[in-house]
Image: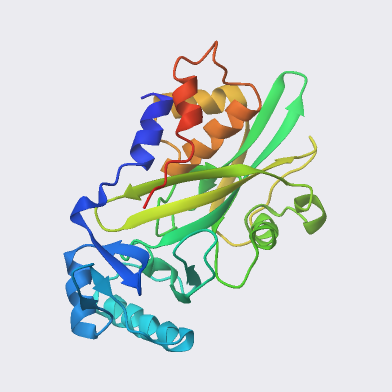
Amino acid sequence: MSYLDHFNQAHNADVSGWTPWFQHDALLGYVQDSFKLRGIEFGLWRESDQGLIIPNEPEVALNQLFARFAKETYEDGLLWSWVGEPFPVKASVTDPTRFVMERTLTAPLGCLTFGVHLNGYVRTRQGIELWVAKRSQHKPTFPGKLDNMVGGGQPAGLGLFENLVKECFEEAGISETQANQAIATGTISYRHTDGRGLKRDILYCYDLELPDSFMPVCHDGEVESFQRLPIDEVLSIIAKSDAFKYNCNLVIIDFAIRHGVLTGDNTPEYAMLCERRNQLGG
């Protein structure tokens, strides 16, 4: 397995076989036949030459409509999990939130979604060491996988940095004062499917240099353990395995590029890795 393999795995979706759905002329997502047909039966959308069109209703009415659809499909077993967290529905990064829906519905409906991921690291005499989290075995998604020190989806009603500060404390016990020192470093984007849903994700990435004495403590039960590893050891794990959650590989590779650990001299695929950090289209 190579670094590039992880980008291929993350950006693996061909949407040509999916049906797009719209609000007026604004593309909001893609669905497969099971959710397409259920949505037609439910009155979530109607078919047109363009694709599927949702009702011309105000924001509050659409919030309620999609909430009822999420509840019904979850109770019927079509929607496979539930978080109870509203996510914003947008046509693009710059688009205002049009309405909200249950977080777990965003993948089967192929919505554009956002997240915040943080690389917590320590500078030592030997070089950079990276804090790595191991996801709880009780997580509904990717249980037991290695993860970034902090990461979370972007819910409705919070700013990106506000969400990062919240996630820092909940997942790693990083204080607000410490979290406020995090530096925004760019984005990672991809279009991924596991066969059940479509993840059109934009991850906002941050770096946070931590003191040697810092010890992370998880407060929300989502992390089983933490370990601090030399960056070369972390990269070796990535290069040889799929031990990390698929998108975290990309965030760490990006970190290694920006900090000069991976270079054009020591990494033959360096230029392609740089180019593919943002791959999201349509």
Q: Horizontal and vertical percent for residue 195? A: 24, 53
Image check: 38 left or right of 136? left
- On screen, residue 138 above or below 52: above
- On screen, residue 42 above or below 261: below
Image check: 56 left or right of 98? left
Total of numbered circles in the picture?
Answer: 0
Q: Horizontal and vertical percent for residue 31? A: 26, 64
Please state which of residues 274 and 243 is positioned toward the viewer in this rendering.
274
- On screen, residue 208 above or below 272: below
Q: Residue furthest right?
A: 177
- On screen, residue 281 above or below 22: above
Residue at x-position 47% and y-position 84% = 59
Give the quadrant of residue 50: bottom left
Image check: 131 left or right of 78? right
Q: Residue furthest top?
A: 265
Quadrant location of the N terminus? top left
The answer to whether residue 230 shows anywhere in this view is no
Q: What's the image's color scheme?
A: rainbow
The answer to whether residue 64 shows anywhere in this view is yes
Residue at x-position 56% and y-position 45% = 187
Give the quadrant of residue 207: top right
Please state which of residues 219 and 209 is positioned toward the viewer in this rendering.
209
Please state which of residues 200 and 215 is positioned toward the viewer in this rendering.
200
Q: Horizontal and vertical percent for residue 175? A: 77, 56
Q: Horizontal and vertical percent for residue 186? A: 61, 43
Residue at x-position 36% and y-position 53% = 282
Residue at x-position 30% and y-position 76% = 74
